[in-house]
Image (spheres, coloured by chain):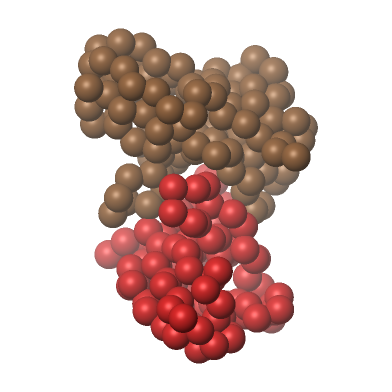
Amino acid sequence: DAGITQSPRHKVTETGTPVTLRCHQTENHRYMYWYRQDPGHGLRLIHYSYGVKDTDKGEVSDGYSVSRSKTEDFLLTLESATSSQTSVYFCAISEEGLGGYTFGSGTRLTVV
Amino acid sequence: RKEVEQDPGPFNVPEGATVAFNCTYSNSASQSFFWYRQDCRKEPKLLMSVYSSGNEDGRFTAQLNRASQYISLLIRDSKLSDSATYLCVVNTHTGGFKTIFGAGTRLFVKA
């Protein structure tokens, strides 16, 4: 019954390669977000979207880009992966900008 | 000073105990507040919203103190299944949209 799915669930990639993570929702929510979670830092916002083709940066956006061509899909691209981008990435959705979030199951990315 | 601070714990409590967590925030313009629960290697899940009047959901009670700028979560009659990390979330929407997650408080409930 998951209204939000992330793919892939796990990925190992080499430094310098581009990587794209996908978030797909079936809830028709306006807002979508990409977070990363690292020990000691909690969840930090990378980018978010408030509509199709409407995106904005979060607090840790350097090295990342996003695209939202359809309401249901929000893609996160690491343009040239670095070891510092090894993390767990969560996508989230919400109906309102300040509402409670529903998170996807996460993507564990390792950059070697 | 961090914008949102939580005691990382861990809190180790026996089953049946009452435990309380606090979360302090620095921006007095913050508008909405939530508690999330995160199990090990899982995604955060919304536990409850926090209102000025306080709200209760079964064994869980959340409260907001705007004057002192903190929110609290009280868990009564702790269960083994309550073992998790509890994250507080503070939202601000003045001159821009900003959501800050606390780093979380770990709770272990022991038999």
Tell which of A4 and A71 is nearer to you. A4
User: Image point 71% across, 75% down: which residue?
Assistant: B57
Tally the numbered discs. 0
> Could you say where residue A30 lies in the image, as x and y percent from the top left?
71, 34
Q: Is residue A85 above or below residue B35?
A: above
In the picture, the quarter occupied by the N terminus of chain B is: bottom left
Q: Is residue A49 above or below residue A73?
A: below
Tell which of A10 and A20 is nearer to you. A10
> Could you say where residue A32 lies in the image, as x and y percent from the top left?
61, 34
> Could you say where residue B66 lies in the image, as x and y percent from the top left?
54, 78
User: Image point 50% across, 88% down: which residue?
Assistant: B17
User: Image point 43% across, 78% down: which residue?
Assistant: B110
Which residue of the protein is positioned furthest toward the front in this rendering?
B111
Colour used to depict chain B in the structure image: red
**Residue A50 seen anywhere in this rendered image of the structure:** no
Left or right: B59 as drawn, with respect to A17: right
Tell which of A24 and B32 is nearer to you. A24
> Could you say where residue A20 lies in the image, as x and y percent from the top left?
46, 17
**Residue A75 seen anywhere in this rendered image of the structure:** yes
Which residue of the protein is positioned furthest toward the top in this rendering?
A17
Left or right: A110 as drawn, with respect to A26: left
Tell which of A93 and A88 is nearer to you. A88
Q: Is residue A83 above or below residue B18?
A: above
Give the quarter of the image for residue A65: top left
Left or right: B110 as drawn, with respect to B46: left
Q: Which chain: brown?
A: A
User: Image point 33% across, 22% down: which residue?
Assistant: A12
Give the quarter of the image for residue A78: top left
